[in-house]
Amino acid sequence: MKNIVLCFLFICCFGIISTTAQNKFTLKGIISEEKNNETLIGVSIIFPELNTGTTTNEYGFYSITLPKGTYKVIISYLGFSTKTETIVLSDNLTKNFSLADSLETLNEIVLTQNIEKLNIQTPQMSVNRLTAGSIKQIPVVLGEADIIKAITLLPGVTSAGEGASGFNVRGGSADQNLILLDEATIFNSSHLFGFFSVFNPDAIKDIKLYKGGIPARYGGRISSVLDIYQKDGNSNEFHANGGVGIVSSRLLVEGPIVKEKGSFLLGGRSSYAHLFLPIFDNNNSAYFYDLNTKLSFKLNDKNSIYLSGYFGRDVFRISETFNNSYGNTVLNFRWNHLLSNKLFSNVSLIYSDYYYGLELSFVEFDWVSGIKNFNLKYDFKHYISDKFKLEYGLNSIYYKFNPGNINPTTETSGINPFKLIDKFALENAVYVDAEHKISDKLALSYGFRLSSFLRLGQDELNIYENDEAVTFNEDFQIYEKADPIGTESFKRSAVIADFFNVEPRLSLSYQLNSNSSIKASYNKMSQYLHLLSNTSSPTPLDIWTPSGKYVKPQLLHQFAIGYFKNFKDDKYSLELESYYKTVKNRIDYIDGADLIANNAIEQVILNGRAKAYGLEMLLRKNEGRFKGWLAYTLSKSEQQTPGRTPTETGINNGNWYNTSYDKTHDISLTSSYDLSKKLKINANFLFQTGQPSTFPNGQYVYNGVTIPNYNSRNSDRLPAYHRLDASITYNPKPEKTKGWQSYWVFGLYNVYNRKNAASITFGQNDETKRNESYRLSIFGIVPSVSYNFKF
């Protein structure tokens, strides 16, 4: 390992020396929107004479070092008018740019913020971007714009179905996705069990999904990174926007604290369909509410501070007997500091909390569980030259896991207070990432992440013979819980188990010509947290648990290669990618595993392995009255848990089996057509291979009881999933750009009323005594209407 670090440092130093020369000067600055001073992420700053350029970072900052001279600079960003200026670079220069909205901003429905040829050159791959504007154009159930539903229209991304939480990327499970909101971890991304996401599109500035080629600054998950940044707020003048729909409404206000220096943003959403239930003599209710907030202040040219937060809750109540509430709370304080013309830094103090509460009146007890973390991050971006950039930093995360706490709610309750043992952990990491343009055709991105995970002391830990918490019964050929032979206790500062991993990252791009390139990437990543769930998609009741003495961290190796092309003057673009990844220590569950209120979860899980591979295609039309994209994925996702010894059978007899998120074919078509300035049609069509499932293939009678016999794990499938959604956007006054502006959206979800199966269950008819299957469908055709406004 020491040799790896020394070798990498040598490469970095060589890159710095070889790309640094005399008589060069640095151009730096901030790029923002003209109307509100909102900083812009990923703006292209291009110098055509030099065939080079750069982009703004997450805070709108850019820096580039060039030889002395006079140059034309092009500032380009989708949805904004391109700006061209002449720069005389005879000394270090600070130059801020403001971009004006393009007239086509409301009509864009695109994936990336720009399709400049510079993107063909960069080594970044397996990354998709969605703008908040394009997300609002996509028809969704009940008319509520949804970030999570939008990204499932991208290649390599699927959902577990209607009414299911989370999303799956390249054959990975939902808990393998790192979801960040202003750098804070979101542990549950869904409202109302998956019908809505927790992200308010009105408050969002930038959305980026990494499926592969993941930079070293990200860690802790092995499947993907969904990185979301909130708007800073308008520092010029007060504005508000919102919408009123059938089941929910939203409102966002923003304005200056100190004009052109400080701003605030406050946004809220709430559903209210439950208010109408009493009309129908229904005492049940299900609703959500959330709040986004952000304060931004520019102290001076070198220092800015931000305070952002999110709070959300879901409430699900059945009469007076069942009351369930859950949600996320995050808070982040950030300080941007410009150390020099070439060195940008950011310090973040982050708090994240996921809470789950359940009250059961009929059994007179309540249940509370959750996970909290405190994160300290210090990141640097070093713009050494126009051909060489470094990103490096460190972070430390302290975790507290509350697996569950049960308390009686009445004095007559038969339930005794019971507290599952809290768990604690500390995750640390340092990283270095280099972006190196070797020549006009070849560019590299390389780096590594050093991660460590310390499982800290807890009040009580079981001890097992031979350290095996699961035993194999050779007589019955089944796995069973092992009986502890004792327990041991630890001080909080003690270390029960520790892990250390080197995670190299490498991406490269070779430009074939001015419009096409081939790219390749390799990632090794570690995941130290596990979501305990034996369902196909996460539920609020699922519990996070850390790696430790009996649960090993998941380790990923992923390879990807792709071909990228812009053609017909960038009106069209094509992306083809193929990937292969393996996962070590993927947890699996023994038959009959009980995950709820289990104080010894190690007794029902085994460490297995997984693999996934596939081919992705994305064809985009970026201009004209008709715009949109076609995405197709051909993939396979499998898991295996072999026996630990020659006499053990393993799970599923040690054979590979389909994971619950294996979808052989996944097709999505998303489109937008401008009928006129006032009317626009949006539609999307989805087709997915049915979700793997396990059905009975026979039965036998024992002592008068009929017992089903099942196939091997996930050897069957639900019927194929497909649906068509459509919407019409009507803007009565499209020419109006000031004062009260509004538009209507009329939508149909599942136009042809497809009864897609969420699950199939089997049982015996009480009258005929014949076996029957029952299909559960969540939605048929669902109409929606919403009124949206801003002023």
Image: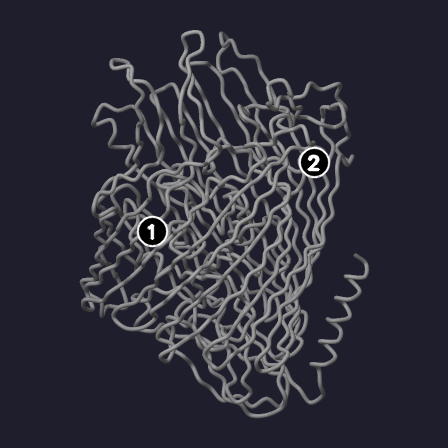
Compared to residue 654, the image places residue 390 above or below, namely below
Q: Which residue is mark 2?
A: 548
Quadrant, the C terminus:
bottom left
Q: Earlier in the sequence, mark 1 or mark 2?
A: 1
For numbered disc 2, what is the local secondary structure? loop
Q: Position of residue 317 (x, y in %)?
A: 37, 26
> Which mark is on residue 145?
1
> Is 504 placed left or right of 161 in the picture?
right
| Closer mark to the observer between disc 1 and disc 2 | 2
Q: Amino acid at mark 2?
A: Gly
C-alpha separation, residue under disc 1 versus residue under disc 2: 40 Å
Judging depth in this view, the residue of 572 and 186 nearest the camera is: 572
> Which mark is on residue 305?
none
> Is 609 placed left or right of 549 in the picture?
left
Quadrant, the N terminus:
bottom right
User: Mark 1 packing: few (<14 Cα in 10 Å), some, or many (20+)?
Assistant: many
Does residue 372 appear anywhere in the picture?
no
